[in-house]
Image (cartoon, rainbow, N blue to C red):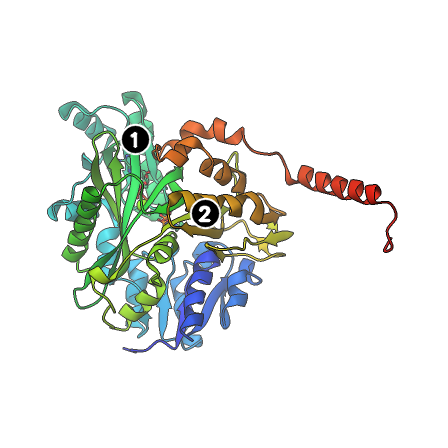
């Protein structure tokens, strides 16, 4: 096995690949990316030192095609493979294949990935480690199982049916009454089968007023397992995160310490190495938190943890992957900032329908306390095959109010994207909403306030442009004829 990384293959695209390239630059590691035919002119292709074509646009033929990715790694003679997030990042078969081919795998062991990849298995391990889990039924083989559980345990609606292998908010259906159980069960089972190749179903009580709070973990091969504080990702649509912040405004110091201890206990139990996240749902009504899942990979929102701690989590993953010891102990890690991230998706801000096409203008925000991870450039095309994430916008400040203020500058006057639709107007109206500002919101915030949020949109940038031209014209005519005219 190689023990040094001079050249790294990033088995991913877009924002995820670009983020990892940033660390490669800092460390003078040569980055190789992969691309499908649709991505031959993509930002991640130009940002890397080299790039290898791995197949046709559908993910199964390119970014999920393990053989082609391994072939690309051999062809470019890399030392290691980083999977980024999404695609093959949580695929234990791929992780094993990377190792068997003699490359360094930048991530936790295939065994750990496998054990946490199934929500039923993961929940059982969590229970065994004395980690509180959402009350539920682990093996649902028919709608009758669910009905019996509800009756026996006197469970109140709503409940949630989940595909055991689901991810990215997919394969989850909320059930409001007994009559909807049959259809929901059929839907979850078929979604699980279709998207994740697994039709196992589980049921859980639905936490109505919950905050999504997760703990970032970093661990090396020498049983050093530390937390890098928490992130709150409560602002979601369709169970997918849109805005993340650190620290969470919902925790007091006692709960925070308990959460960190619980997360570390679980990760210790499974011998975790590399970066990973333990996700919890915090019930605002009972003030209890419940284990959701472990993400055995770099997470989209890791950057806000980097902003509050000053660490480079991708860099730490590379160190751990080559067998280095973590360069700190728990008390050395300090967080003294508030940070916030929004996911700028190429979607209609009212309907969340994906938006494709050419980006005709792309003005990135600039200023103090801002960080941008772009996945695109001006002139780039957004193909319809992949995730809608265009770029990550992060801000920081001495406290939450400051981080929100900087984000307001970013979204309100700094960023300009034209040619495609983005959810920027929605993100802006969320961060200006009194409930968001006060911290009094749950995972249903967008659903509950959508009308209100949409009503604040200023319509179409076209109108802005017309106004701007009109203003110039009036200024010029007021000044009379000029020398340059
Ligand atoms: P997080 O946002 O916390 O990092 P997510 O579960 O939202 O984790 O997933 C991260 C990214 O990976 C998202 O862009 C999501 O769309 C994508 N993703 C997650 N699971 C899958 C999957 N099974 N197939 C394709 N993309 C996925
Ligand atoms: P995924 O693998 O898709 O990320 P998770 O189990 O992490 O699935 O859940 C994603 C989101 O779905 C959570 O952040 C939360 O908003 C919602 N969710 C999951 N389980 C429950 C539950 N039992 N009650 C209420 N909301 C839930
Ligand atoms: Mg999750």
Label 1 within 8 A of ligand 2 by Cβ: no
Residue found 20% across the figure and 46% down from its top: 259
Relative height, residue 483 to residue 430 (above, below): below
Q: Earlier in the sequence, mark 1 or mark 2?
A: 1
In the image, which disc is placed on residue 345?
Answer: none
For mark 2, give the secondary structure: strand
Outermost residue, front side: 479
Residue found 57% across the figure and 45% down from its top: 413
**Rendering coords of residue 465 (x, y %):** 70, 42
**Rendering coords of residue 141 (x, y %):** 22, 36
Mark yes or no: residue 346 visible.
no
**Rendering coords of residue 176 (x, y %):** 31, 24
Relative height, residue 264 to residue 248 (above, below): below
Label 2 within 8 A of ligand 1 by Cβ: yes
Asked whether 467 or 301 is in front, the reply is: 467
Asked whether 311 or 206 is in front, the reply is: 311
Relative height, residue 19 to residue 421 (above, below): below
Q: Name the residue under label 2.
A: 343
Q: Residues within 10 Å of mark 2 (few under 14, many from 20)?
A: many
Q: How crowded is mark 1: few (under 14 residues within 10 Å), some or many (20 or more)?
A: some
Q: Are marks 1 and 2 in contact (CB under 8 Å)?
A: no
For mark 1, give the secondary structure: loop
Q: Distance between the residues labelled 1 and 2?
A: 23 Å
Residue found 51% across the figure and 59% down from its top: 56
Residue found 54% across the figure and 53% down from its top: 365
State which quarter of the image contains the N terminus. Answer: bottom left
Q: Quadrant of residue 37?
A: bottom right
**Rendering coords of residue 139 (x, y %):** 19, 38
Q: Quadrant of residue 162?
A: top left
Q: Mark 1 points at which residue?
A: 209
């Amino acid at each position: 096995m190689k023990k040094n990384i001079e050249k790294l293959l990033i088995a991913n695209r877009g924002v995820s690949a670009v983020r990892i390239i940033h660390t490669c630059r800092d460390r003078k590691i040569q980055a190789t990316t992969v691309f499908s035919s649709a991505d031959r002119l993509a930002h991640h292709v130009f940002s890397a030192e080299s790039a290898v074509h791995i197949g046709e646009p559908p993910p199964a033929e390119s970014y999920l095609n393990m053989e082609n990715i391994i072939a690309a790694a051999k062809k470019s003679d890399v030392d290691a493979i980083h999977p980024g997030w999404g695609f093959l990042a949580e695929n234990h078969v791929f992780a094993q294949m990377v190792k068997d081919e003699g490359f360094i795998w930048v991530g936790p062991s295939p065994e750990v990935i496998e054990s946490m990849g199934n929500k039923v298995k993961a929940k059982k391990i969590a229970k065994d480690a004395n980690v509180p889990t959402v009350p539920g039924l682990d093996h649902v083989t028919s709608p009758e199982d669910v009905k019996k559980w509800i009756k026996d345990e006197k469970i109140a609606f709503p409940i949630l049916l989940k595909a055991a292998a689901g991810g990215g908010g997919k394969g989850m259906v909320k059930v409001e009454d007994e009559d909807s159980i049959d259809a929901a069960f059929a839907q979850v089972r078929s979604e699980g089968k279709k998207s994740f190749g697994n039709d196992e179903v589980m049921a859980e009580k639905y936490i109505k007023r919950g905050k999504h709070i997760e703990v970032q973990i970093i661990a090396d091969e020498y049983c050093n397992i530390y937390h890098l504080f928490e992130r709150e990702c409560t602002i979601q649509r369709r169970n997918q995160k849109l805005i993340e912040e650190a620290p969470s405004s919902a925790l007091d110091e006692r709960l925070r310490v308990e959460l960190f201890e619980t997360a570390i206990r679980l990760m210790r139990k499974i011998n975790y190495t590399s970066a990973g996240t333990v996700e919890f749902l915090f019930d605002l009504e009972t003030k209890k938190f419940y284990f959701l899942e472990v993400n055995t990979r770099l997470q989209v929102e890791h950057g806000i943890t980097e902003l509050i701690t000053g660490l480079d989590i991708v860099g730490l993953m590379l160190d751990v992957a080559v067998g280095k010891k973590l360069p700190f102990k728990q008390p050395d890690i300090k967080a003294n900032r508030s940070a916030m991230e929004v996911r700028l998706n190429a979607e209609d801000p009212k309907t969340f329908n994906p938006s494709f096409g050419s980006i005709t203008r792309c003005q990135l925000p600039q200023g103090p306390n801002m960080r941008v991870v772009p996945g695109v450039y001006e002139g780039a095309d957004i193909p319809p095959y992949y995730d809608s994430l265009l770029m990550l916008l992060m801000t920081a400040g001495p406290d939450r109010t400051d981080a929100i203020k900087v984000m307001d500058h970013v979204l309100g006057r700094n960023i300009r994207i034209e040619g495609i639709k983005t959810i920027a107007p929605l993100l802006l109206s969320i961060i200006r909403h009194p409930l968001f500002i006060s911290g009094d919101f749950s995972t249903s915030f967008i659903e509950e306030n959508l009308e209100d949020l949409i009503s604040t949109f200023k319509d179409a940038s076209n109108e802005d442009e017309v106004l701007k031209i009109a203003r110039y014209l009036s200024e010029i005519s007021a000044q009379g004829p000029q020398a340059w005219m």
